[in-house]
Image (cartoon, rainbow, N blue to C red):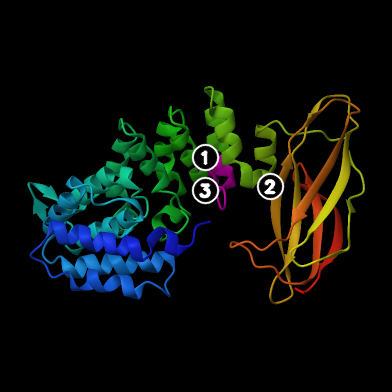
Amino acid sequence: MPFADELLGRPQALALAAAFAAAAPDLPLTALRAAPDRLEPLTLGRRSDLLRDAVLADVPGTYADLEAVVRRTTAAGALAGWAVWPVGSALAARALQDPEEEADGVAAFDAALAMLAELTHLLTAEFSIRALLRHDLDRALATITTWTASPDEHVRRLASEGTRSYLPWATRVPALLDRPEATLPLLDALRRDPSDYVRRSVANHLNDLSRHHGDLVVATAGRWFAEPDAHTLALVRHALRTLVKRGDPGALVLLGYGGSDLAVGALELTATEVPFGGEVGFAATVTNGGDEPARVAIDYVVHHQKANGTLTPKTFKLASPTLAPGEAYVVRKVHSFRPITTRRYHPGAHALELQVNGVAQGRVDFVLLPEA
């Protein structure tokens, strides 16, 4: 995963200040010029916030005034990459200062949505539309629904991605959490989209909903299976991945996983003590003892030790074989504990277990040794 400096660091901040200086040469742009020296200790989201606030401070006036400056930067080809995030957020924030302020007969709220749809192809406006969704979900969704018919795949994706309930790096929209059914019309409209880029967003959106609304997600996937196209199975599999890892019965049945006579052999680890930064291998055998073929979802769960000494599970996908009657499938895998940016390892007691069609099997304990 890229670091904040790579996405929104000093070069991007300097380029943003230069773009606004060229578009609005009469403005002093004091905050934007100072911003590059203030980024260093901040996370990516905080960096975007700092630059958003700098844009708002340096370009006074109405929403229309700010949009005019932004349009001059885009016309010159000077706005691109991750700098689009704070600029889009500034447009949304300025629009919400007076949502009904009109420019050319269009209210600022609606003008901002339209402008963000224009900007999204430069990076994405998925983070910026969140403020507008928080302000008035139904009004925003009325416009966003029209984006599902856009000829631009970036705009169609924005309709799905920007309205995800758990969009990474984005602020939460409480109304989306409270009303999980509100965005289903968007997903229904986009599930057959010709672009894999869009369909993947639809799957991730539905997977977000599965965190707390598994029955709704399974019912939606079932509706789609009733009228499938060539991409429905792949989309639904990706959308139900969290429910499958949890062993949700409805999701497993919908995807054809089954087999009541599955036998899982003993789980064997290559070591009971694993060096910090090292790896542990494991193996087991899954056998279909029934009279019918059985499709099997095989995952494994690592119970990591937390800083407070408790264990927390993390599920990893392994395989989805279809086993003939009497057929055995040998599971082999090596799990690494090399340092990564998205997880911090703590030495001490850990455990590993298989999960077959959602059912935990054969937990084995091991120890992650302290860093040498």
**Magenta stretch: dominant secondary structure:** helix
Marking on residue 245: 2
Crowding at dot 1, Cα within 10 Å, few <14 / some 14-19 / many 20+, comes out as many
**Alpha carbons under labels 3 and 1: distance apart:** 10 Å
Secondary structure under the numbered disc 3 in the rendered image: helix
Q: Looking at the picture, which amino acid does disc 2 mark?
A: Lys
Q: Is 41 or 360 nearer to us in this picture? A: 41
Q: Residue at x 70, y 41 (%)?
A: 249
Secondary structure under the numbered disc 2 in the rendered image: helix
The residue to which callout 3 is attached is 209
**Alpha carbons under labels 1 and 2: distance apart:** 15 Å
Quarter of the image for residue 146 reads top left
Residue 290 screen position, x and y as percent: 89, 29
Q: Residue at x 84, y 35 (%)?
A: 260
Above or below, 345 relative to 85: below
Where is the C terminus found, in terms of image quarters? bottom right
Q: Which residues are magenta?
A: 206-217
Above or below, 18 relative to 111: below
Task: Residue 214: say if magenta.
Answer: yes
